[in-house]
Amino acid sequence: MKELLIAISIFSVKIGEANETATKFQIENNWLGFEPIKNEQIQNVEKRLGIILPEDYKEFLKISNGFSAPNNVEPTFHKVEQIDYLRNIEKHTIESYNYLPELENSILIAGKDEEQYFLLIPPKNVNEKWRYWKFANWYPGEHEFSGLSEYFKETKNYLEKEYAEK
């Protein structure tokens, strides 16, 4: 996953798409990430949320505690201290999309106050897996990914294509 984040950072900076969430330091260093966190910080947020987070998200946090948006479309991944259940952040979104019961227990990890969210949806039982959604009002329905790596691969491929066309 780290290689994907590095590639996203480099392509984003090279094509000038690192959005306003990126700091000057991040742009100068071709790294849209932040300092990694320790297991204790992850355990603290798991305790606060009352859930065990998926392994790939924990891996991401150990690489970078958050990640600036690589362009003006993709969401900014928040620092772990800022994540919470969508119902605690945007209750009106859950009410507006009451036909999507998954939103009620989803965890907003990216996109607060932006045009689209990235959500983690906990499994309902032990036989299910975590679900990963990119969700926006302007997008017809949710865009589901098999995991964070798939999302970051898609983002890297998009930026790589943009760079090649530039």
Image: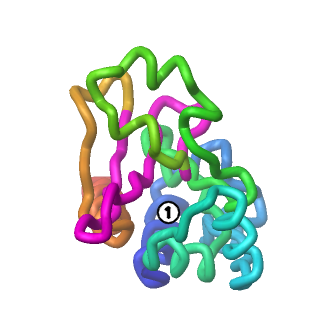
Q: Which residue corresponds to the image point at 44% horizontal and 36% vertical from the top-left? A: 104
The image shows residue 100 at horizontal and vertical percentages of 29, 30
| Quarter assignment of residue 148 | bottom left
Residue neighbourhood size for the residue with mark 1, other residues' Cα within 10 Å, grouped as few (<14), some (14–19), many (≥20): some
Which residue, given by chain and number where applicable, does mark 1 sit on? 14
Residue 133 falls inside the magenta stretch: yes
On the picture, is 109 further left or further right than 162?
A: right
Residue nearest the viewer, comparing 155 with 24: 155
Q: Residue furthest front?
A: 125
Q: Is residue 157 visible?
A: no
On the picture, is 155 further left or further right than 88?
A: left
Residue nearest the viewer, comparing 164 with 91: 91
Q: Which residue corresponds to the image point at 69% horizontal and 75% vertical from the top-left? A: 43
Residue 130 falls inside the magenta stretch: yes
Quadrant into which the C terminus falls = bottom left
Q: Which residue corresponds to the image point at 46% horizontal and 43% vertical from the top-left? A: 105
Residue nearest the viewer, comparing 51 with 150: 51
| Quarter assignment of residue 23 | bottom right
**Which kind of residue does numbered mark 1 sit on?**
Lys
The image shows residue 131 at horizontal and vertical percentages of 31, 57
The image shows residue 125 at horizontal and vertical percentages of 31, 62
Span highlighted in magenta in the image: 109-135
The image shows residue 22 at horizontal and vertical percentages of 67, 53
Against 13, is 86 above or below?
Answer: above
- What colour scheme does the image use? rainbow
Q: Secondary structure at mark 1?
A: helix
| Quarter assignment of residue 37 | bottom right
